[in-house]
Image (cartoon, helix red, strand yellow):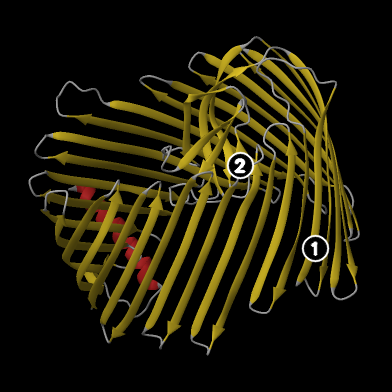
């Protein structure tokens, strides 16, 4: 009883403070400030056919669903004392499926959720935010399976604001439980996360931040009690500090200390890294950059140490000439090998204004590398090696003699594993492996991927190579006309043949032009890459059109063709074609019509793949009633298979 009285006194004092700030305020034990929601009704109809080996599989499916949602905002006694947001939704759905070569069936679904968020004393130095989300869905597929899914997500954020130790504490717990009713097969996933963050300024020149993170994962798939639960635990500790050592000029010293630990029942990983970066403006034209990186990694029984020292000096002469000289050293020590790399590089770039509103750009770069490696022939595992994948580039694995059976390709986060033949192709080119994405798969063009694999490392060797790169471009009429040329090459000094070691000699020339004229722009580029590993010749051109007609019609059209005239050997070709278009017409601020069309094709030797997609959508609003309609079309041809799909949908939404 004494504790309750004390809490009431504290809240009363706080209410008195906030009341004093607002003379018109009248206390209320609970007040509803906002109530909104919507009621919707949706329907879809789709039909398609898939022709494979002369068999036509025609399908038809339709669905009808409704939903009601409510959203509320309220507070207790005062908005700054305790604010409360609660929302909920319920959506039932029924679907029918009909096919020629497969049994007909119907499906009933239902989904509902409730979400709650609170903020306590948000205007004080001690504030608390809490949240709770509950989602439940049930799917019953006639004569096949019934699946019930329940997910809960809750947690909170505590902010402690003061000048001594500012602190933010985050806690969240997520649990997903999926049950197949007929088979009693259950999938349980749980993630618990605790994080502490502190940011503090020490004077005007020093800023520090500290982050402590602990995440626990639990996964279990079972239909019996004796199936073990897969548990993994991640610890992440990071300390960052930025110090300005000068008063007038910017002389920054940045330091970062990180510890990472990933532990499972079958595997343990541990990594500690220290990074130090020093940047200084020596004069108005001269800057110095120095960096030191240290990494210590334990993966199972293997230990690897890596440290880098990078120094660069940059000089700027007016706005025209920029010069850079750098010296880098990298040492790597593994249980099976040790390696050092010394790199000396120089870069120059020059920009000059010329008549006709033009610019002349020149660049030159030189790089000299010395690699010293000691080790015996052995199988080396590689984890999370990063690559940038693009249709306009040949993507080869960095190492040769890779065991293709061990290759795993993932997205940039490492959480999605791509499938060969659906998302990518692997092409063996001598001792190297080429990766080629499949348009329409999960790997998007111009994106990053991660690779795990094993390869055979060569024995001890010393290698010295040099590379140059120079280019020029001329622009006229404020970049409306541009012509460019680039040359690069790489060669080795006193090379010798060794097993499991392949040296990449190459010479490369790229040139082309770009044009801009009002609403249209385009370009063409020719790339001649002469290499002892994967030579190729590439012709790439594109056209873009974009504009507005009558102030209401927006249009855009893009065509791009990437044509490999030769890859690896004479006679092998490869082509990509992309055509996308969009039309958007706004009748008024309530009504608009939008159409998207896309065509993509890929020709690789005797294999042709083509996609054609289209979407037409119409949206309007009558007072509080919103109407959405959509038509979709999809066609795909691939290796003798022809798939077609057409669909339509309509949705009515009444907001209140």
SS class, disc 2: loop
For the residue pair 208 and 477, the one nearer the viewer reads as: 477
Residue at image coords 66%, 44%? 566
As drawn, is 344 to the left or to the right of 649?
Answer: right
Percent across and percent down for residue 655 are 24, 77
The C terminus is located in which quarter?
A: bottom left
Percent across and percent down for residue 243 are 71, 44
For the residue pair 286 and 355, the one nearer the viewer reads as: 355
Percent across and percent down for residue 105 are 11, 52
- Rate crowding at label 1 as few (under 14), some (14 to 19) or many (20 or more) other CA atoms within 10 Å: some
Residue at image coords 49%, 70%? 581
SS class, disc 1: strand
The quarter of the picture where residue 16 lies is bottom left
The quarter of the picture where residue 529 lies is top right
Depicted 358 relative to depicted 97: above or below: below
Q: Does label 2 or label 1 sit earlier along the sequence?
A: 1
- Residue 125 appears in the picture as rendered: no
What residue does disc 1 label? Answer: 483
The quarter of the picture where residue 511 lies is bottom right
Residue at image coords 41%, 43%? 422
**Mark linked to residue 381:** none
What residue does disc 2 label? Answer: 572
Cα–Cα span, label 2 and label 1:
29 Å
Count every numbered label the image shows and give the total.
2
Depth-wise, is mark 2 or mark 1 nearer the camera?
2
As drawn, the residue found furthest toward the bottom would be 550
Depicted 216 relative to depicted 269: above or below: below
Depicted 639 relative to depicted 10: above or below: above
């Amino acid at each position: 009883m004494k504790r309750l009285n004390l809490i009431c006194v504290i809240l009363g004092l706080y209410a008195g403070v906030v009341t004093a700030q607002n003379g018109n305020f009248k206390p209320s034990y609970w007040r509803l400030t906002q109530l909104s929601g919507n009621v919707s009704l949706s329907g879809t109809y789709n039909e398609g056919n898939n022709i494979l080996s002369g068999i036509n599989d025609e399908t038809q499916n339709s669905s009808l669903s409704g939903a009601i949602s409510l959203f509320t905002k309220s507070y207790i006694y005062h908005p700054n004392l305790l604010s409360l947001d609660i929302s909920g939704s319920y959506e039932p759905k029924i679907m029918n499926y009909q096919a020629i070569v497969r049994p007909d069936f119907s499906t009933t679904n239902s989904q509902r959720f409730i979400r709650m968020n609170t903020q306590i004393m948000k205007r004080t130095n001690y504030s608390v935010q809490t949240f709770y989300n509950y989602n439940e869905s049930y799917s019953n597929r006639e004569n096949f399976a019934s699946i019930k899914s329940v997910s809960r997500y809750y947690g909170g954020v505590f902010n402690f604001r003061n000048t001594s130790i500012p602190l933010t504490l985050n806690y969240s717990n997520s649990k997903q439980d999926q049950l197949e009713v007929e088979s009693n097969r259950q999938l349980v996933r749980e993630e618990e996360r605790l994080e502490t963050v502190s940011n503090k300024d020490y004077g005007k020149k020093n800023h520090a931040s500290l982050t402590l993170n602990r995440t626990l994962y639990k996964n279990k798939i079972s239909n019996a009690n004796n199936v073990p639960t897969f548990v993994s635990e991640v610890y992440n500790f990071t300390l960052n500090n930025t110090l300005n050592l000068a008063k007038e000029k910017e002389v920054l010293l940045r330091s970062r200390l990180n510890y990472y630990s990933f532990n499972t029942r079958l595997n343990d990983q541990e990594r500690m890294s220290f990074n130090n970066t020093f940047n200084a403006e020596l004069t108005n034209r001269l800057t110095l950059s120095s960096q030191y990186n240290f990494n210590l990694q334990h993966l199972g029984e293997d230990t690897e140490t890596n440290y880098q020292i990078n120094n660069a000096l940059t000089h700027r002469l007016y706005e025209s000439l920029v010069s850079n000289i750098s010296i880098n050293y990298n040492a790597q020590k593994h249980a099976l090998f040790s390696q050092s790399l010394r790199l000396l590089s120089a870069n120059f770039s020059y920009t000059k204004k010329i008549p006709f509103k033009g610019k002349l750009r020149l660049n030159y770069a030189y790089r000299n590398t010395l690699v010293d490696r000691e080790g015996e022939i052995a199988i080396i595992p590689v984890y999370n090696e990063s690559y940038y994948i693009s249709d306009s580039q040949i993507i080869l694995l960095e190492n040769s003699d890779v065991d293709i059976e061990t290759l795993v390709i993932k997205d940039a986060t490492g959480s999605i594993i791509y499938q060969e033949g659906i998302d990518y192709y692997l092409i063996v080119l001598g001792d190297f492996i080429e990766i080629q994405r499949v348009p329409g798969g999960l790997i998007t063009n111009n994106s990053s991927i991660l690779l795990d694999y094993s390869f055979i490392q060569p024995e001890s060797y010393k290698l010295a190579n040099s590379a140059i790169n120079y280019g020029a471009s001329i622009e006229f009429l404020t970049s409306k006309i541009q012509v460019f040329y680039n040359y690069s090459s790489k060669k080795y000094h006193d090379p010798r043949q060794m097993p499991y070691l392949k040296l990449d000699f190459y010479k490369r020339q790229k040139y082309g032009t770009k044009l801009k004229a009002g609403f249209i722009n385009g370009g063409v580029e020719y790339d001649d890459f002469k290499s002892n590993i994967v030579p190729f010749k590439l012709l790439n051109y594109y056209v873009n059109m974009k504009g507005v007609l009558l102030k209401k019609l927006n249009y855009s059209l893009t065509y791009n063709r990437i044509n490999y005239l030769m890859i690896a050997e004479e006679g092998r070709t490869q082509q990509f074609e992309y055509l996308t278009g969009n039309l958007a017409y706004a009748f008024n601020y309530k009504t608009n019509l939008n159409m998207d069309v896309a065509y993509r094709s890929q020709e690789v030797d005797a294999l042709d793949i083509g996609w054609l997609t289209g979407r037409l959508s119409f949206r309007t609003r009558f007072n509080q009633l919103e109407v959405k309609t959509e038509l979709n079309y999809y066609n795909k041809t691939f290796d003798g298979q022809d798939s077609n799909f057409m669909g339509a949908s309509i949705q009515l939404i009444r907001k209140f």
